[in-house]
Image: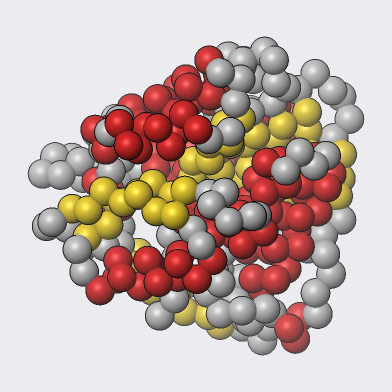
């Protein structure tokens, strides 16, 4: 039993690499032992959390089965529970919004586009590789995402979005499209990038072309060029910058297959290291290197540790 949560993994990773009191995480949990597990894990790395606590819903849980000669395969079953129930009202509480105003980087995981509202519409998720529209679905809290996005654009702060899973752009294209003009950095792995291309009708599965297209989609804040980053496992990481023809490639940190215990959370860790680098004013190349270092570290541990 280890603390998880995609964006929460990223927050812990960033705080692990940064000075104390650098990161705060917002989300929704239940009032149960699983929330206590999360708090304990966050406390160990000094991550501040401001949870909305739902008195009825359980804290989300994910069961992961690791198989393969080098622990390379993952089977996951998730009950999102209270994670579906974050609200704009919690974000706008004066004590919480003050933290938003004091932050320089906002990071949102793609799962925040998914889910259902309490007692309302159920989530419909397509199988990977199929098309879907988002009619009949109600995202967790797109209004909260948009409040952060508009705050970032208005005050020239940095807004980072992780696609998180292939089904996100497929099943929730409309919500992703609404937020995308405000995105300064978009992160995704190879399969997530292909799903994005399919959802937005790009007509290609070439990772470089997809990265270039994501980087050059319409953008609200013209003071920052959008950067699209596509990770590809042990292959080079691709980076496209708005207005630039060249797609740069960065080699990953080598790890012996025998040292890989679990790939869960490696992408979340990469995002954490990247955000830490950006916050510290590192170059893009240095920030990517920090992300790859942290991803390599988590591969050698069980869970997104």
Question: What residue is drawn where x is 83% and y is 39%?
Answer: 283
| The N terminus sits in image quarter | bottom left
Image x and y of residue 294, in percent: 70, 63
Q: What residue appears at the point 54 percent right and 66 percent down from the top-left corner? A: 45
| Of the pair 257 and 41, the residue shown nearer to us | 41
Across the whole image, how many numbered discs are drawn on residues? 0
Q: Position of residue 56 (x, y in %)?
A: 11, 57
Q: Identify the image quadrant of residue 186.
A: top right
Q: Quadrant of residue 5?
A: bottom left
Residue at image coords 53%, 35%: 103
Q: Is residue 58 left or right of residue 143?
A: left
Q: Quadrant of residue 14?
A: bottom right
In the rendered image of this protein, does residue 299 appear above or below residue 268?
below
Taking the image as drawn, is residue 165 in sight? no
Depth order, front residue of 147/104: 104
The way the protein has been coloured in the rendering is secondary structure
Q: Is residue 149 left or right of residue 118?
A: right
Q: Is residue 172 depicted above or below 251 in this figure?
A: above
Q: Is residue 51 above or below residue 61?
A: above
Q: Position of residue 86 (x, y in %)?
A: 28, 43
């Amino acid at each position: 039993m280890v603390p998880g949560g995609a964006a929460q993994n990223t927050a812990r990773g960033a705080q692990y690499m940064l000075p104390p009191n650098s990161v705060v995480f917002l989300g929704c949990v239940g009032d149960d032992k699983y929330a206590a597990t999360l708090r304990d894990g966050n406390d160990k790395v000094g991550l501040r959390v401001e949870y909305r606590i739902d008195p009825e819903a359980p804290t989300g849980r994910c069961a992961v089965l690791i198989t393969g000669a080098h622990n390379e395969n993952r089977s996951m079953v998730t009950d999102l529970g209270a994670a579906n129930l974050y609200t704009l009202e919690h974000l706008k509480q004066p004590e919480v919004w003050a933290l938003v105003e004091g932050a320089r980087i906002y990071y949102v995981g793609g799962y925040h586009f998914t889910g259902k509202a309490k007692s309302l519409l159920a989530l419909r998720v397509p199988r990977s590789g199929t098309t879907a529209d988002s009619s009949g679905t109600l995202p967790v809290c797109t209004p909260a995402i948009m409040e952060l996005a508009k705050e970032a654009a208005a005050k020239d702060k940095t807004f980072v979005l992780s696609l998180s899973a292939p089904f996100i752009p497929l099943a929730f294209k409309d919500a992703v499209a609404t937020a995308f003009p405000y995105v300064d950095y978009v992160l995704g792995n190879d399969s997530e990038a292909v799903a994005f291309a399919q959802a937005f009708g790009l007509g290609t599965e070439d990772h470089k072309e997809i990265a270039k297209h994501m980087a050059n989609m319409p953008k609200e804040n013209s003071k920052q060029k959008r950067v699209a980053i596509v990770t590809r496992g042990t292959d080079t990481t691709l980076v496209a910058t708005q207005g630039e023809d060249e797609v740069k490639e960065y080699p990953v940190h080598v790890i012996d297959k025998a040292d890989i215990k679990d790939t869960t959370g490696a992408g979340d860790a990469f995002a954490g290291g990247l955000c830490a680098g950006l916050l510290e004013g590192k170059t893009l190349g240095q920030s990517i290197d920090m992300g790859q270092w942290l991803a390599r570290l988590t591969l050698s541990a069980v869970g997104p540790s």
